Image: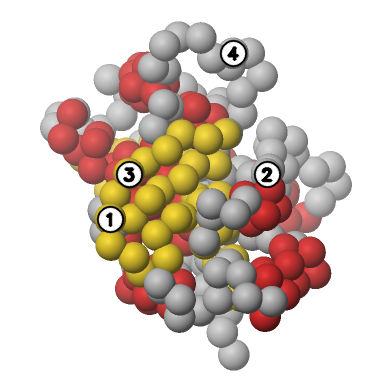
Amino acid sequence: MKAKELMELLFHWCDDNGEKDYSNTCDTVKNGDPDREIRKVAVTMTATADLIRKAQEWGADLLIVHEPTFYSHMDQHLENDPVTKAKEELLAKTGMVIWRYHDHPHNKKMDMIGEGTVKMLGFQGTWINRLWAVNRFILDEPLTPREIMERFRRNGGEHVRICGTVDEPCKNISLCLGTPRGVFEELQDPEVDVVLVGESCEWALGEYARDAAALGFKKALMIIGHNPSEKGGMILLSEMLSNEIPSLEIKYFDCGEVYHTL
């Protein structure tokens, strides 16, 4: 199987009704030859320099990523930038194909990234479709924001922070994973108890949630970190690939968090 044949299959998995416009998608090849024959497929959130080295050592022919490799949404390479140049040289040495898988999984009727995060956290309840990369989940049994935070921590989210309510049992969760639009509107909605977000504006959303709790509203904003908030979707992808295409060797690589703890 060629790299491009596998990616076309993955795109088909997510195109529920064939009505989405992907003429300007970021889901394109970022490095290597799309016609390369593949045997080993690595899956991750972000192709960091360290992760590229690990995937190469494992022998990956194809690395499927969710986020940009070159620091902008469409992966435009920065000109006259030494970091960009060094990463280009690193990738050229590997010969590995890197392909982004972002728009298609978010466009799936049940957002694949959110679906994977819900599975990773062990949530049981009802899924509600909303907007691009913004969905809701009603828990069968309430959890406090602190309990949800602990579930992220058990799955590698070491820098989760909570603004607002911490120990109030909640059922109505808004999944704003990564950094989508519409987070403030979700936080304002009286039907939402907790907003889970990868990144946010502290002086706006954080202070809103803090004041809401102090003024008697059951409201929390949980800032997870971008990669930990969405990686469940890529773990799910690796599981699906292993089940559906046993002829390929599939491995999920955790790229870690961007922060260090002092």
Q: Considering only order in the chain, which callout, 3 or 4, is on the residue closer to the N terminus?
A: 4
Q: Does residue 49 sit above or below 128 in this rendering? A: below
Q: Horizontal and vertical percent for residue 140?
A: 28, 55
- Asked if residue 146 can be seen in this view, the reply is yes
Q: Say which quarter of the image contains residue 188.
A: bottom right
Q: Mark 3 — residue?
A: 126
Q: Quick check: marks 1 and 3 in contact, CB under 8 Å? A: yes
What residue does disc 2 label?
182
Disc 1 versus disc 4: nearer the observer: 1
Please, which residue is most extreme toward the bottom here?
A: 262
Q: Earlier in the sequence, mark 4 or mark 2?
A: 4
Measured as percent of width and height from the top left, residue 8 is found at 40, 17
Real-space CA distance between mark 2 and mark 3, rounded to the nearest whole angstrom: 21 Å
Structural distance between the alpha carbons of marks 2 and 1: 25 Å
Q: Name the image quarter holding the N terminus.
A: top left
Please give the label number shown on residue 21: 4
Q: Give the residue at x 52% y 73%.
A: 160
Report the disc number at residue 140.
1
For label 3, the SS is strand
Please tell me which of labels 1 and 3 falls first in the chain: 3
